[in-house]
Amino acid sequence: MPKCWETRRRGEQGFSLLEVMFSMVILTVGLVSLAGVMGIAMASTQNSQEQAISKRLANEALESILTARETANITFAQIANTGSGGIFLSGPQPIDLAGTDGIVGTADDAAAGAQVLDLPGSTGVFMNSCPNGPDICLSLSNYTRTITIAPYLVGGVPDSALNVVTITVTHYNPQMKTLAQNYILQTMISQYR
């Protein structure tokens, strides 16, 4: 009988302290890794919103140029940077509203003031425009837009009927302490409508 009791006792033994400590270390490493992945996911979510805003700002500038050409508000020769006889400012510019000419990226934009992005508030519905309503007014002061227009080169020779338009929107997130990130939109524009 003592042998039967002895065999039974060995089968009912629990985990040793060493086994419990080892499993706790494995569990801790797994939880810390999971927390790191969640942090990366949150940063990516923030970055995706900034990229979406950058894309919208670049498209806004391109649509402004195309609309001005389509409505004949400007000549094809004016679709160039100021150093090349055009109306579009060179170098990075703050995100301002379109000026009196209605074209983004020209000299009269500064007088129109800074553009503010109006987002719906906690209700998810636009209630009032910024800054009086419950909506969220997002400043675009950490964004800049550069419009570069150059003639299209065919075999090293400029084509007078075709320009390459490159719009670069740069944003910097001071909370994330990351380097500036660029969104680049490049297309060609013809003098023909």
Image (spheres, grey):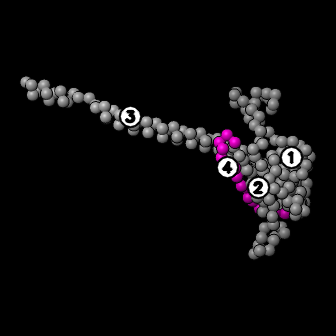
Q: Which residue is mark 3?
A: 24
Q: Is residue 33 above or below residue 192?
A: above
What range is drawn magenta here? Answer: 174-191
Spatial CA distance of label 3 from label 1 is 60 Å
Q: Which residue is mark 2?
A: 167
Residue 13 showing in the rendered view: yes
Q: Which residue is mark 1?
A: 98
Q: Which residue is mark 4?
A: 179
Residue drawn at point x = 83 percent, y = 67 percent: 161
Q: Is residue 35 above or below residue 73?
A: above
Spatial CA distance of label 3 from label 2 is 53 Å
Q: Residue 158: say if magenta.
A: no
Q: Nearer the viewer, residue 170 or 187?
A: 170
The first of marks 4 and 2 along the sequence is 2
Q: Is the C-beta separation of discs 4 and 2 under 8 Å?
A: no
The residue carrying pointer 1 sits among few (fewer than 14), some (14 to 19) or many (20 or more) residues within 10 Å by Cα, namely: many
Measuring from the top left, give residue 138's x and y in whole percent. 75, 37
Of labels 4 and 2, the one closer to you: 4
Residue drawn at point x = 90 percent, y = 62 percent: 85
Q: Amino acid at mark 3?
A: Met
Residue 17 occupies which quadrant of the picture? top left
Residue drawn at point x = 73 percent, y = 58 percent: 186
In the displayed structure, does residue 5 sit left or right of residue 117? Answer: left
Q: Amino acid at mark 4?
A: Leu
The first of marks 4 and 1 along the sequence is 1
Q: Amino acid at mark 1?
A: Ala
